[in-house]
Image: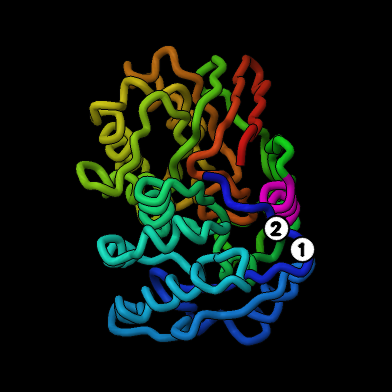
Amino acid sequence: MIPKKLRSGDHIRVIAPSEGLAPKLTKELRERGVKRLGSLGLKVSFGKYLDEQNEFDSATVEHRLHDLHEAFKDPGIQAIISANGGSSANQLLKHVDYELIKANPKVFCGLSDLTEVTSAIYAKAGLVTYNGPHFSMLSAGKIMDHSLENMRQTFFSEEPVTLSPSEHYLNDQWEDELIVNSSYWTINEGEAEATCMGGNLMTFNFLAGNQFMPDFKDCILYLEENHIVDKKGVQKELQEILNHPLGETIKGVLIGRFQRETGMSRELLTKMIKTKKELKNVPVIGNVDFSHTAPMVSIPFGGKMKISAKDQDEVSIKILEH
């Protein structure tokens, strides 16, 4: 089930299913985030408990559920975006009213720790969700035009979306240094067309063996990791997915751009992928703009994707259904 596309004048609600907004996201930066969403024609409001933070930087489970359910229940809200990532979104999964969500489908977008929520909503309610920028990234990121244009294409139109690399990026949403972006990388050549799913590598692995892990048989997986995990950890996390009973059915893999702190390079990523026998005949594309670097694109969890990877980094990534 794909949520209804947005129109100018629609209302987007910012909530915090994981950590609340960081104090360093000043009033000025929040206003910039509201203005940027406003450039898409969206009206912005905030969940009641958005700023509540306990010792783990999150609101209580009850308060986070309140804001999540209220956002889906309110007919005046057409889209929901997470405030931030964190480490506590999985506390909500067994308590979410998935029937409420199924009866009130709307755009739901989040990144990183929210991978467990986007996955659970898809698995339990059948609603296509989106791996995309948090409100904090839209607010703090120095360059976000690439993200906003992609959101316009993804959330406001049913036409296929062709992804293209951003010209520059930031290693972290809080940094100012503009880094020249290279093209997407062909790691393994090949073509595939399939349902796409994914998000944060570590968080996706957390779902293994429980009811909130979707059936990813014959899917294209898109996977990324942030700076808290180094190159050795990335190798371990990817192998864990390939060890899953469905690991050998994967039709294609997209790898999000790595932050410099991971120590991952193109050479190391290529060597890592080439050692995975499960991926021998699977197209693999690296350095794609969905990760903890900014800007980033929004990719559907449960949509349909077509990819092609040829020699000399001749890459095509098209979102067919979103």
Which residue position holds label 2? 6
Establish if 280 lies above or below 245: above
Q: How is the image coloured?
A: rainbow
The residue under the point 75% across, 57% down is: 145
Residue 198's image quarter? top left
Which mark sits nearer the N-terminus, 2 or 1?
A: 2
The residue under the point 67% across, 71% down is: 11
Which residue position holds label 1? 40
The circle on residue 294 is none
The residue at the far front in this view is 103
Establish if 167 lies above or below 24: above
Magenta stretch contains residue 93: no
- What is the secondary structure assignment of the residue under circle 2? loop
Is residue 109 among what the camera can see? no
- Of the residues shown, which amino acid type is indicated by label 1? Leu
Instruction: Describe residue 188's horizontal placement relative to residue 152 as left or right.
Output: left
Is residue 69 among what the camera can see? yes
How far across and how far down the image is residue 35, in percent? 74, 74
Instruction: Describe residue 166's horizontal placement relative to residue 247 as left or right.
Output: right
Between 10 and 177, the one lying in front of the other is 10
Image quadrant where one finds the C terminus: top right
How far across and how far down the image is residue 80, in percent? 55, 65
